[in-house]
Amino acid sequence: MNGRKAQAARNDQVILDAARAVFVADPGAPIAAVAERAGVGISALYRRYAGKEDLLRKLCADGLKTYIAEAETALADEGDPWNAFAGFMRRVVDADVQSLTINLAGTFTPDEDLRRTSTRAAELAERVFDRAARAGALRPGVNVADTSLILDQLAALHLGDEARTAQIRHRYLTLMLDALRLTSAPPPPGPPPTAEEVTRRWKV
Amino acid sequence: MNGRKAQAARNDQVILDAARAVFVADPGAPIAAVAERAGVGISALYRRYAGKEDLLRKLCADGLKTYIAEAETALADEGDPWNAFAGFMRRVVDADVQSLTINLAGTFTPDEDLRRTSTRAAELAERVFDRAARAGALRPGVNVADTSLILDQLAALHLGDEARTAQIRHRYLTLMLDALRLTSAPPPPGPPPTAEEVTRRWKV
DNA sequence: TAGCCAATGGAACATAATGTTCCGTTCTAT
DNA sequence: ATAGAACGGAACATTATGTTCCATTGGCTA
């Protein structure tokens, strides 16, 4: 298949890739920046999405889906529960999911479908976490919400280059995982984060 | 002393406090928000500062000064070098210095004086860190720049309430410090951050 | 007491940024 | 050859926001 239709199909992907790159780098970027990066005109965007919010919702939903996929991969791992959990965290950092979900939250109004996806993502993550916890691999006093906030912190790291940023994020993820693995250390101070505190960032 | 002059003197402080609160919560906040929070008119601001950048520079310089003060306190501590270092980190988190320096960097052009202050701050922090390192209290492979990036990550944490935010930041600072204290653990992966990478965020 | 002036409030102004629409053009399929 | 999908990008509408300007207030001094 060639011609106009093929270009359109290719553009679907090109636009999504560009949008992801642009909004990961700057969540408040103008829509024109996406068009420029994709090498298309603005109407190519508006033909596909009703508006900016629509595009952001799509990106966020995609991010949650890869998060879910990684969690399912971790759950399918029959080996050491701690390793499954740690691997899950590393893959989520690599996919830069947090930049697509947390950093975009609040810039658009979520729809029902997105809320459902978000709920499912949280459930799966909890199962990955709990399995490691029940195996006695985790420091006392930590919970799933802690892992969300840890991912948030890592997503805040920006060092110019995308590759270098990923590298440095893994550096601090390693430190955090080491701290979470200290099963005989005292619980970290302060009340642990609640699910509500982690969810509050979503608009409406 | 009373009357107009006293009000002006009070306003100096009120305006600075309001500006700190507003820009810590939102580095891109409009200047009108500061005036509103301070309960003064806009001209009360423009009488004191040539423009928005001027105010931001002032806030940033103040932040660096408290950072320097805390580092000097740590250096004056003759006790355990690790405790001095850890206390320094905790106090910097409490003062929310990072929100006034890193988060504001890039939104204004630093002047010569601010650059000098910044350099001095880095020197002192390095001495606090090195003393702990020479005492053998630190995990191999970590350096001062690591502590900067750790503070950045913590500053990215926002949980509505200011008190709660401080609480949760201390939670993860504790985890990070625990990981930094594992003197017989392997060095964290990836090339450590360089001074240049930590400094790059400054405009010009 | 009259008058000067620092200090202020806040409307008005000037821009800049940016989401969205619209129209002429291109290219494919029939 | 023609209809219509897909597109480019200028034009438009709106909003956000830094800065200026002027009338007003209140204390201090001659």
Image (tube, coloured by chain):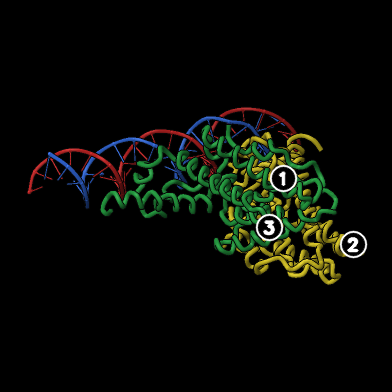
Chain colours: A yellow, B green, C red, D blue
Q: Is D8 on the left-hand or right-hand side of B6?
A: right
Task: Kindly identify the amino acid type of the residue bearing the numbered disc 2.
Answer: Asp
**Circle 2 sits on which residue?**
A77
**Mark number, residue B155:** none
Does residue A3 sit above or below B35 in this rendering?
above
Locate residue B42, reporting x and y percent.
Answer: 36, 46
**Circle 1 sits on which residue?**
B130
- Which secondary structure lies at badge 3? helix
Residue at x 74% of width, y 44% of height: B143
Confirm whether circles 3 and 1 share one chain. Answer: yes
Chain letter for the residue marked with disc 1 in the picture: B
Q: Residue furthest right?
A: A79
Task: Kindly identify the amino acid type of the residue bearing the numbered disc 1.
Answer: Asp
Chain letter for the residue marked with disc 3 in the picture: B
Q: Is C2 on the left-hand or right-hand side of A118?
A: left
Image depth: mark 1 or mark 2 in front: 1
Chain letter for the residue marked with disc 2 in the picture: A
Number of marks drawn: 3
